[in-house]
Image (spheres, rainbow, N blue to C red):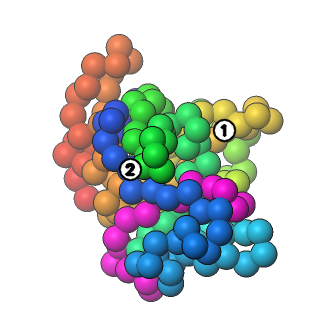
Amino acid sequence: MATIINIHKQAGQKKDAVRINSIADIPAFLKDTITIKGNQIHLVCVEGNETAPLGSVIGYEESTSTSTGWNTWHIANASTNLVEIDGVFYKKATVMPAMAVSEEFPEFLKGADITHNEDGSWSIKTDWGISTGFPSASYWVRYGTKEDGTPDANILTKTEKSYRDYIVCGEDGQDIGLLCEIDPV
């Protein structure tokens, strides 16, 4: 079984994110990537198309892995992991357990809706859709616990820009180094 590590993002850094309450909130460069149908936000993302309710905070990054050139996702844990100041989002340093995707999923995800797929990949059902990752190409990350007691978790894909934002730390919270340097793509 793979080793469980502790990770966090650098606190205080600006997060490429936007709160979407209406079509007017979608930045021009994301009009092909973020759409609204009824009261749902529809997102193009690397791990699969996602949806989120209006009023959600949406993260974004450039990507060569999507048809639109942008990877977007619902930041369901924005209230605990981000600070919003005048419509701009900044990261909090929240320590989270993570583990490289392998042949088994970690105990810290017990209770999550996880599927082992025929192609060797794993999928996890999130509040906004299904995320899929492959062994040696992605990480399981647990952001916290949802109100119903199930894990708030997702899959972090190593080829995406956001992978470079994570810092590995010890149990004492002491930083060890960037995840992308410890486990390069």
Check disc 1 and report its element: helix, strand or loop: strand
For label 2, the SS is strand
Type of the residue with mark 1: Pro
Using residue 53 as the reference point, say whether residue 90 is left or right of it. Answer: left
Task: Tell me, yes or no, if residue 124 can be seen here.
Answer: no
Per the image, the residue denoted by label 1 is 151
**Image quarter hosting the C terminus:** bottom left
Q: Which mark is residue 74?
A: none
- Residue range (magenta): 52-69
Q: What residue is shown at x 70% (from left), y 62% (from top)?
A: 54
- Circle count: 2
Label 2, label 1: how many angstroms apart (C-alpha)? Answer: 23 Å
| Magenta run includes residue 64 | yes
162 above or below 66?
Answer: above
Identify which residue is drawn at 63% across, 41% down. 152
Which labelled disc corresponds to residue 15? Answer: 2
Q: What is the crowding at mark 2: few (fewer than 14 residues within 10 Å), some, or many (at least 20)?
A: some
x, y percent for residue 165 = 31, 47
Judging depth in this view, the residue of 136 and 30 nearest the camera is 30
Residue in front for this viewpoint, 93 or 106: 93
- Residue 127 in the image: x percent, y percent? 70, 54
Q: Considering depth in this image, is 122 or 15 the residue closer to the camera?
A: 15
As drawn, 24 above or below 124: below
Can the viewer see residue 28? yes
Of the two numbered discs 2 and 1 in the rendering, the one whose residue sits closer to the viewer: 2
Say which residue appears at 49% left-offset and 66% top-offset.
72
Where is residue 77 shown, x and y percent of the image? Answer: 58, 42
